[in-house]
Every structure is written in C-alpha cells, then in structure tokens.
Image (tube, rainbow, N blue to C red):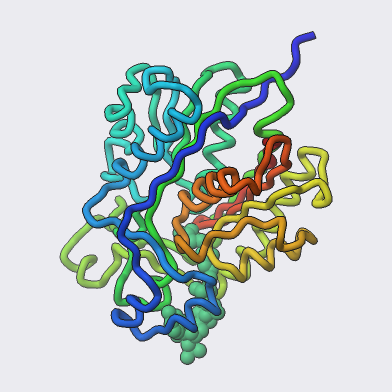
Amino acid sequence: MTKNLFAQITGLGMCVPPKILTNADLEKMVDTSDEWITQRTGIKERHLVEGETLSDLSVIAAREALQDAGLKGEDLDLIIVSTTTPDMQFPSTSCLVQKELGAKKAACFDLAAACTGFIYGLSVANQFIISETYKNILLIGGEVLSSITDWQDRSTCVLFGDGAGAVILEPTREEKGIISVYLAADGNFADFLKVPAGGSRQPATIKTVQQRLHFLKMRGNETFKVAVRAMGEAAKEALSLAGLSSKDVDCLIPHQANIRIIKAAAKRLGLDEDKVFINVEKYGNMSSASSAVALYEAVKCGKVKQGSIVVMTAFGSGFTSGGCVIRW
Ligand code: ACO
C-alpha cells in the first residue's frame, strides 16, 4: 500500500531591512517610554524599510529558502505571498517575486489573513501538495507594516515592524512535515483591527487622507483578550487533529505580537516557557512575517531539531486564527 503524502518544509529564508527603530527613538517621536513599551509588549526594537519594497524583502528571503532547499526559481510550481501590505493593489506581489526569481512555470497569488496569514498559507500549500497538484511550493509571509502605521498614534506605532520569511514545501512519504492544520475566523470582530480606507468601500480621497483613514486602527485592549483565547484554542485544536497533546510539544512558535499574549497562550497550553520561542523583542509584530521569521530563527538556533514536534499558533485581523502541528 502506498504511504500517505506529507508536505515537508525543506528550505527556510528570511529578510529584515537593516534600519532599526529603538524604543528610545520612539520616545522622541510620540509621548511614550521604553519602560511602557517593554512592560506592555516586550518589544525593544523593530526593523523598518527605507525605500525597500515588500517584493524586495520577499525575494531576498525566497532566494535563501531556495538555496537551503537546493532548488532554483525555475523548479517552483506555485508561489504564495501572504500579506496585507502588497507592493500594489495589483498585480499580486507573488507575480513580482516570480519575475525576480525566474520562476517561469509557477502559478502565483497573494493571500490575506493578516497575522494568521502564514498558517493559512501553510494550509493552502499543504492541500496542493497532498492532492499531488504541485510539488515545489514557495510560501512567503511578508509585510511592510510601516506603510500603514500612523506615526502620530502612540497606541499602535510602537507595535509593528517590517520583514519577510520564506519556506519551500515539498512532498514526502515519510511521516514528517505538516501533520495537522486548524483554521478559524470570526468576522463579527472585523471593526476591531482594520485599515478603513483605500479599498473599494472608501477609495482614497483628500478627505480620507486628511482623516488618517489609510492607517491601521486597533482596539488594542479588546483585541488582546480575544487573542489570548484564540491562540490557545487554535493550538489545542491543531494538536487534537494530530492526535497529540501539549505534553508532546517540543517547541511552541506563537505569533509574535506581544510578550504578554505569548506567555498567556503558553500558560493556557500548560507549556513551560523554555518550550516557547520568542523573538518579539527584536522585531515587534511583523504580522504575516512574524511566524515565518520565528520558525526560521527557532530552527537556525537549534530550538527546533530533527524530529521535534512544533506547534505554530497565530491570531490577527478579521479576526482570524490558526494552529499548525509540524514534525520537523
Ligand atoms: N506609551 C505610553 N502610554 C500608552 C501607549 C504608549 N505607546 N499606548 C497607550 N498608552 C496608554 C493609554 O493611553 C492608556 O492610558 P490611560 O489609562 O490614561 O487611558 C494606557 O496606556 C493603557 O492603554 P491600554 O490600551 O489599555 O493598554 P494595554 O495594556 O491594553 O496595552 C497593547 C496596549 C500593547 C496594544 C495591547 O492591548 C495589545 O497588545 N493588544 C493586542 C495587539 C494584537 O495582538 N494585535 C493582533 C495582531 S495585529 C494584526 O493583525 C495586524
């Protein structure tokens, strides 16, 4: 009997722009302090673009992932870019990445599920692989959140950063790679975290610009409460689908929005902090890129090893949430 197919991650890459904005820098821009930002969020600094585009960051991350997997651009069957800050409304950023990589035979699309986008992307890539539609898939989680950040709003501008992470997924008959994925959404919370204008509902006008409606708006406190619950639940659901429990987890890679959300979600799962990967202090919340970059760093620093059971969990605008179990 033929064994089941699994989607395995065979290559990893990442890119953050060189410019760093520290909490001390932010103290000079808005009425805030390093102490407030550190205590409330765990963030110390974030990387911001200075002219680089999302596709620039994505291509650098993708090239590293391709090299890691021993593949070339022309080997790719599909490119997915998960983002809420594409270079342009259209064409999709994935098409711009395809051109730079010379990935002539790859189908391309962008995917929007905010901070949960990388896990949604893993789910989509997994389906294309196990259905034997495609073999070599490039998934990128990337954001230039600084382009929608209101630098006059202290309640949000301290939180976000720019970056991109990339993975290559390929089929394997060994029982490794993506073991389960759980996705969820609740559009009742759509108003809690949004960019009100710039879409077809409120196209750009002088008034929308003057009213600062092209910037991200968040009801932070309410979002925080739902995030803790949803990230814990998504991880539990994914573990249950995999027939595993918290005791089996070697490394939890939560969406890096806020240290307090991460710790609370880990507590809900009954996991010790040494099993939780955290890098929010260096990058802030990079939305879709956060999970991809955290996975990259968890593997490269040896926290995730061959055979490790990894659980990824994320939460974002929509609200969306998702969990994924990977046997590394
Ligand atoms: N510096 C100093 N004071 C501040 C700042 C700041 N940067 N920002 C807000 N404050 C003040 C507020 O004005 C308020 O003052 P008041 O008590 O005098 O009114 C006080 O600090 C407390 O404000 P809260 O909003 O209640 O602070 P909270 O503890 O909730 O922390 C935070 C705010 C960090 C935003 C938190 O709510 C959070 O992390 N929320 C979730 C974010 C998230 O996970 N988003 C989901 C993913 S993002 C995506 O999808 C793109």
Residue 268, picture quadrant? bottom right
Work out whether 198 lies above or below 168. Answer: below
Quadrant of the frame with the C terminus: top right
Identify which residue, 215 or 20, lies in the foreground.
Answer: 20
Work out whether 210 lies above or below 133. Answer: below
Residue at point 56% right, 53% down?
320
Work out whether 9 lies above or below 150. Answer: above
Residue 31, picture quadrant? bottom left
Quadrant of the frame with the N terminus: top right
Q: Position of residue 96 (x, y in %)?
A: 28, 33
Most distant residue in the front direction: 301
Residue at point 37% right, 78% down?
24
Q: 19 left or right of 242?
A: left
Q: Position of residue 251 (x, y in %)?
A: 69, 50
How many numbered marks appear?
0
Q: Position of residue 62 (x, y in %)?
A: 40, 35
Most distant residue in the top direction: 1
Residue at point 73% right, 42% down?
309
Q: Can residue 83 be seen at all in this image of the molecule? A: no
Q: 283 left or right of 5?
A: left
Most distant residue in the left direction: 206
Q: Can residue 213 be seen at all in this image of the molecule? A: yes
Q: Position of residue 193 (x, y in %)?
A: 46, 64
Residue at point 30% right, 66% down?
213
Residue 9, picture quadrant? top right
